[in-house]
Image (spheres, grey):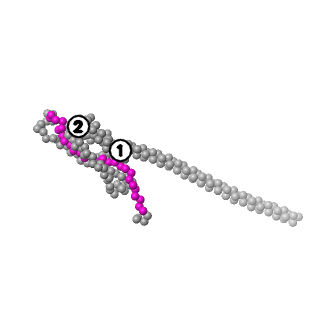
Amino acid sequence: MNLTFFKNLQKELATFLISIAVATILFVVSNSWWQTSYNNKVMAEDNLTEAKERYYSAINQKQILKEFEKKYKQLISSGIVGDEDRLNWVDTIEKITANNKIPYLKYKIDKRQELKSDEINQKYPGIQLLQSTMSLDMQLLHEGDLYTVINSLHDNAKGLFDIKSCAIIRNTTQIESLVDSQTDKNFSAKCELNWYTMKKGVVTLPTEGGY
């Protein structure tokens, strides 16, 4: 009886141990599978987040490029980028002279030259800045005509300019009061304007080793 009892006990104990071993294996496998699934989920979420960031970054960059392209086209249309539109300058001057009844206006435009400096090259690599000097010699009815000429050029002519120098003097006359003057050339004015344009330049990349 005792032998039978011990045999049954051994059988039950063996079954119990096998059950524990199987349960342990199942737990380890299940935990490993869960951990792998969790890691895959986290990785998928990270990949999704990264993909979303790249997507929104691409949209943002595309919008920025559109804005730059729009501004670049505006600069071309306004005559600041590209070749100078001297015909437009001349046509504008002639219209200003006719519309404002300027007695005399003679112009001269010097040859365009490139402006070179280390500061420009460092700040704006790949951009070529050019300048043309325009000289204006005018006979005016009154001082306000000078402002009219400069302001009209600013508003109507294509391009970008600044005033290098400008001077106006009253012409010598025997008449003390301009009210009694019989001429429309009471003032002489001379101005020099610098017109600026930009073009794409060539960027020189440093060679390997600095040679």
Q: What element carries label 1?
A: loop
The crowding category of the residue bearing disc 1, from other C-alpha atoms within 10 Å (few below 14, some 14 to 19, many at least 20), is many
Nearer to the camera, 84 or 10: 84
Real-space Cα separation, disc 2 to disc 1, in angstroms: 26 Å
Identify the residue at horizontal 36%, vertical 43% (top origin). Answer: 78
- Look at the image and say whether residue 202 sits in the magenta stretch: yes
Q: In this view, does 166 lie to the left or right of 75?
A: left
Identify the residue at horizontal 82%, vertical 62% (top origin). Answer: 11
Q: Do the residues labelled 2 and 1 touch (CB within 8 Å)?
A: no
| Residue identifier under label 2 | 102
Task: Give the quadrant of residue 159.
Answer: top left
Q: Is 153 drawn above or below residue 47 in the view shown?
A: above
| Residue identifier under label 1 | 79
Disc 2 marks a residue whose amino acid type is Ile
- Look at the image and say whether residue 97 sits in the magenta stretch: no
Identify the residue at horizontal 40%, vertical 56% (top origin). Answer: 203
Give the number of the disc on residue 188: none
Task: Give the quadrant of residue 122.
Answer: bottom left
Q: Is mark 2 on a helix, strand or loop?
A: loop
Nearer to the camera, 60 or 192: 192
- N-terminal of the pair, mark 2 or mark 1, is 1
Q: Which quadrant holds the N terminus? A: bottom right
Magenta highlight range: 181-207
